[in-house]
Image (spheres, rainbow, N blue to C red):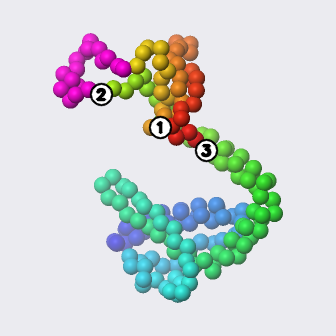
Amino acid sequence: MTDTETSIVGIVVKQILDKISSAWKPYDEMEWNISDTAMEPRYLNIASEADVVLLVSFTFNLESSFGEMKFCVPVSSVDKTFDHFFSNKQSNSIETDNESADALKKLSGGIKLSVAGVLDETDFTVNDIVNLKAGDVLRLDSKITNNLKVVVEGKNKYYGKLGLFGSKKAIQIVGLSGDDLV
C-alpha cells in the first residue's frame, strides 16, 4: 500500500477501534490501538501458534473494488472481560435481557426500510414488454378485490387493502404473510 492508502486505512481502523471500545465500555475499560499492520499476517507477532485468537473479519465493497480487513485478538487478552461479562449476565440475566431489548428497540426504531404495496405479479414475454406504449393495459391474474402484498425490504410481510388516507393512497394492513415473518 502507498503511504496515502496506509494513512486512510489507519484513520478508518482508528474509528472502528473507537467504536469497539465504546461498545465494550459497559463491561470493561479496554484500550484498543494499532500496534502494527501488514499485508501478510504471518509476519505479525500477535500471538504464538498455540494461542487461541479471536478473529473478526470485515469485507469492504467500494464500487468496483473490494477488500477484507481482519482483527486478530488473542483470547488471553480479553479473558478478564469475558469473565466479567458472563458473571454479570448470569446474575441478572432477565433484567439485562429486558434492558438490551429496550436498547435495541430504541436504536433500531429510527431505521428506514423500503416498503412497497404489490398489486399482483404475472409473466410477460420480452416482446410484450418492448412493445408497451402509453394506454396499453396489463392484465393481471388476481381479482380487484384480492389483498395486496405488502413487501418490506423485498420480503412479503403483510397483506393489505388499497385505499385513501386524506388525499393520499394508503394500504390498510389486514393480515400477516406466512412468508419469512419477523
Magenta segment: 123-141
Identify residue for label 1.
155
Residue 138 falls inside the magenta stretch:
yes
Closer to the eye: label 1 or 2:
2
Closer to the chain start, of discs 3 and 1, is 3
**Relative to the observer, which residue lies in front, 179 or 110?**
179
Q: Is residue 90 visible?
A: yes
Going by the numbered disc 2, the residue's amino acid type is: Asp
Q: Secondary structure at mark 2?
A: loop
- Helix, strand or loop under label 3: helix
127 sits left or right of 88 in the view: left
Does 46 appear above or below 16?
below
| Residue 91, quarter of the rendered image | bottom right
Q: Earlier in the sequence, mark 3 or mark 2?
A: 3
Residue at the image point whose x is 54% and y is 87% from the top: 50
Instruction: Name which residue type carries label 3.
Output: Ser
Q: Of the numbered discs in the image, which one, if any, rests on residue 108?
A: 3
Mark 1 residue element = strand
Residue 63: image tag: none
Calculate the distance from the C-alpha at mark 3 to the C-alpha at mark 1.
19 Å
Residue at 32% in and 17% down = 139
Q: Earlier in the sequence, mark 1 or mark 2?
A: 2
In the picture, the disc for residue 123 is: 2
User: Horizontal and vertical percent for residue 157?
Assistant: 53, 34
User: Residue furthest toward the right?
Assistant: 91
- Compute the Cα span from label 3 to label 2: 37 Å
Res 11 visible: no
Relative to residue 104, is residue 181 drawn left or right?
Answer: left
Q: Are marks 3 and 1 in contact (CB under 8 Å)?
A: no
Q: Position of residue 146 (x, y in %)?
A: 47, 18
